[in-house]
């Protein structure tokens, strides 16, 4: 029986050496070590042998079966690599020939409209002497709430449905969440600088909200502040009007009304007349003709103090600009949910060549 197994293995080696196709290799595998394969048939005869013979034949049979299995697997791997290489050769693109690689029937990519507007906003503020800061999406409770004058029992927490990470620790420095605004970047910026300073913090923020035409759970803000001596509301209005006129390339009608935000005092809501409907009412402006675009105000003394800045000597203003709504006004987009739809037909409208 050992001789028969040797003969079977030699025949297998001869046949496998001629095969390169994966299907043929798999068929050969079934022929030799399948349930009804030649090696399996030999092994079935073990039951008719005496114990001493089974102890000799069994290990040899298993060794030959393992060898066949390893040879087949190696052959399959090589066949797969050859298929991949053949496919790459057939679909090869010569990137040194621009006209064939990128011009003929190939579309150009482009930036997302929010990215375009964010870059434009950054450039406007850079031209006015502001820094552009960045910070992590995952923040701690101190930076996101407490340092902004929002303690645990403050009603403002109800205004921001927060995505919290599970944390067994009660330490506010370790209690993690997805940031609900980029004001936490301002806290980091204030701790690292001494007045006077001015900076903006653009980025993505997260809130557990019900989505509709003008609300999303993931959206974008650009928040900023200017801190120095003898800063007034007049300075705030001036910078905001310059920003909006540069963004919309025209004067836009705005209104300033009182607003409550724990980190500013006094606080304001700066609205612009809806550019989608011209003020007649639509789904974006909730039929009122105005869109809340820019909450702002004078930095609360407690916020300055918690960041190590003397509120008796310095003051300033802060603002938060909703980039998504700004893009909607700029391009006449009537539903904020388009931004995260993944629909290439939508983003392709904003490509620049």
Image (cartoon, rainbow, N blue to C red):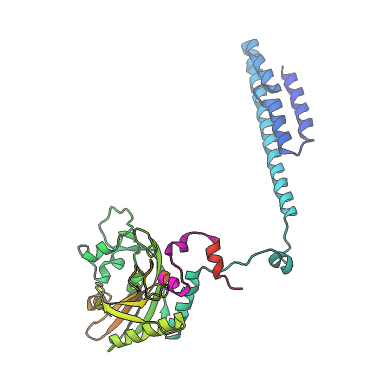
Residue 108 picture location, percent across and down: 62, 67
Question: For the magenta stretch, what is the residue range?
Answer: 325-343
Please say whether residue 150 is visible from this viewpoint: yes
Which residue appears farthest toward the bottom when viewing the image? 230
- Between residues 104 and 162, which one lies in front from this camera angle? 104
On screen, residue 12 above or below 129:
above
Q: Residue furthest left?
A: 153
Q: Residue at x 69, y 35 (%)?
A: 72
Which residue sits at x=72%, y=19%? 2
- Quadrant that contains the C terminus: bottom right
Left or right of 62 in this view: 212: left
Q: Is residue 259 left or right of residue 127?
A: left
Depicted 278 relative to depicted 343: above or below: below
Residue 253 drawn at (x, y percent): 37, 82
Taking the spot 66% from the left edge, 25% from the top edge, the residue there is: 34
Q: Residue at x 40, y 70 (%)?
A: 325
On the rendered image, what quadrant is the N terminus found in?
top right
Q: For this view, does 47 lie left or right of residue 269?
A: right
Q: Quadrant of residue 15?
A: top right
Residue 63 placed where, x, y %?
66, 27
């Amino acid at each position: 029986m050992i001789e028969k197994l040797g003969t079977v293995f030699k025949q297998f080696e001869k046949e496998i050496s001629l095969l390169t196709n994966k299907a043929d290799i798999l068929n050969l595998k079934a022929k030799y070590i399948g349930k009804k394969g030649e090696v399996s048939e030999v092994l079935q005869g073990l039951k008719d042998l005496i114990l001493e013979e089974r102890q000799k034949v069994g290990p040899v049979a298993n060794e030959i079966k393992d060898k066949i299995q390893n040879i087949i697997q190696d052959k399959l791997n090589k066949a797969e690599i050859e298929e991949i290489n053949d496919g790459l050769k057939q679909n090869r693109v010569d990137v040194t020939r621009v006209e064939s690689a990128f011009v003929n029937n190939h579309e150009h990519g482009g930036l997302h409209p929010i990215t375009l507007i964010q870059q434009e906003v950054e450039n406007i503020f850079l031209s006015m002497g502001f820094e552009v800061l960045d910070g992590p999406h995952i923040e701690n409770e101190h930076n996101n709430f407490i340092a902004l004058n929002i303690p645990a029992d403050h009603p403002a927490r109800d205004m921001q449905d927060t995505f919290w990470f599970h944390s067994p620790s009660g330490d506010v420095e370790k209690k993690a969440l997805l940031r609900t605004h980029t004001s936490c970047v301002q806290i980091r910026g204030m701790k690292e600088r001494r007045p006077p300073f001015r900076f903006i913090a653009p980025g993505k923020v997260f809130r557990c909200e019900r989505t509709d035409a003008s609300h999303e759970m993931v959206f974008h803000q650009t928040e900023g502040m200017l801190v120095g001596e003898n800063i007034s509301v007049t300075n705030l209005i001036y910078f905001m009007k310059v920003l909006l006129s540069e963004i919309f390339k025209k004067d836009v009608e705005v209104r300033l009304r009182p607003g409550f935000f724990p980190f500013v005092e006094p606080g304001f809501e700066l609205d612009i007349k809806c550019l989608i409907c011209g003020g007649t009412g639509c789904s974006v402006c909730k039929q009122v003709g105005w869109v809340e675009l820019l909450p702002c105000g004078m930095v609360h003394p407690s916020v300055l103090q918690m960041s190590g800045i003397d509120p008796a000597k310095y003051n300033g203003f802060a603002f938060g600009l909703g980039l998504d709504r700004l893009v909607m006004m700029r391009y006449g987009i009537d539903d904020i949910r388009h931004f995260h739809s993944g629909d290439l037909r939508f983003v392709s409208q904003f490509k620049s060549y």
